[in-house]
Structures are given as C-alpha cells and as structure tokens.
C-alpha cells in the first residue's frame, strides 16, 4: 500500500509532466518544477502528517520566487483536496 502523501506528490508530478515540465525533489524535501532549460517555475513546500498536509506554492516572478498559494488541508476534507488539485492543474 502506498502512503497517502503519494496521492499528492504523484498528482503534482503527473500534472506537471502533462505540461511538459519536470518535478525534482531536493535533499531537504522541496519539490521543484523545472522546464527543459532547468529554470525553476514553481516550488512546492509540502509537509505531511497523519492528519493533514500543508503546501506552500512559490512561483517564478520578476524578482525570483514569490508565495503564490498556501493551504493546510485535513486528509478527511475531500472537497478541499479536490480544490487544491484543481488549483495545481491551473498553474
């Protein structure tokens, strides 16, 4: 059985791959979305617990990365998880 955090990380990876982007993980557990030139377009700072997950999404701007979106969602809140996934699809 896969951990519940796999649902989120796998979804982000598949979504970014469909957009022609790649997902990489840093040594400290940050997820970077890069284009073919290895420019970082997004950074996902994910924290998983037994009860919920938190995510801060940073996006590339004129002055570097900036905080674009932040959530803290209980695993039992399916509606909020779907909204988060819709938000990621729209990035």
Image (cartoon, rainbow, N blue to C red):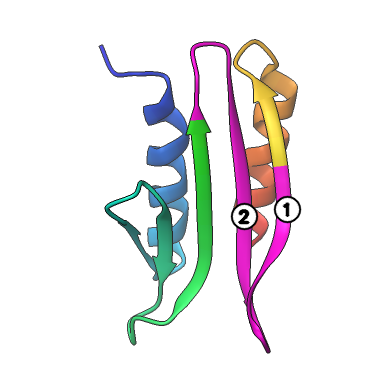
Residue 51 falls within the magenta-colored stretch:
yes
Q: In this view, does 43 lie to the left or right of 58?
A: left
In the depicted structure, whether residue 28 falls above or below residue 32:
above
Relative image position of residue 89 (x, y in whole percent):
60, 53
Please tell me whether mark 2 sits on a helix, a strand or a loop: strand
According to the picture, the residue beneath numbered tag 2 turns out to be 57
Residue 30 falls within the magenta-colored stretch:
no
Q: Residue at x 45, y 41 (%)?
A: 11
According to the picture, the residue beneath numbered tag 1 turns out to be 69
Q: Give the range drawn in magenta.
A: 48-70
- Residue 58's label in the rendered image is none
For label 2, count other residues whose C-alpha is less than 10 Å away and answer few (under 14), some (14-19) or many (20+): some
Q: Is residue 2 left or right of residue 68?
A: left
Relative image position of residue 1 (x, y in whole percent):
25, 11
For label 1, count other residues whose C-alpha is less than 10 Å away and answer few (under 14), some (14-19) or many (20+): some
Quarter of the rendering containing residue 26: bottom left
> Are the residues tagged 2 and 1 within 8 Å (C-beta)?
yes
Q: Is residue 82 left or right of residue 30?
A: right
Q: Please tell me whether the stretch drawn in magenta is mainly helix, strand or loop.
A: strand
Relative image position of residue 19 (x, y in whole percent):
46, 66
């Amino acid at each position: 059985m896969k951990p519940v955090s796999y649902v989120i990380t796998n979804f982000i990876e598949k979504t970014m791959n469909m957009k022609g982007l790649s997902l990489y993980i840093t040594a400290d557990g940050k997820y970077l979305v890069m284009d073919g030139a290895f420019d970082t377009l997004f950074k996902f700072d994910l924290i998983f617990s037994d009860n919920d997950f938190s995510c801060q999404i940073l996006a590339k701007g004129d002055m570097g990365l900036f905080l674009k979106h932040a959530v803290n969602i209980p695993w039992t809140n399916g509606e909020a998880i779907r909204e988060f996934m819709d938000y990621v699809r729209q990035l």
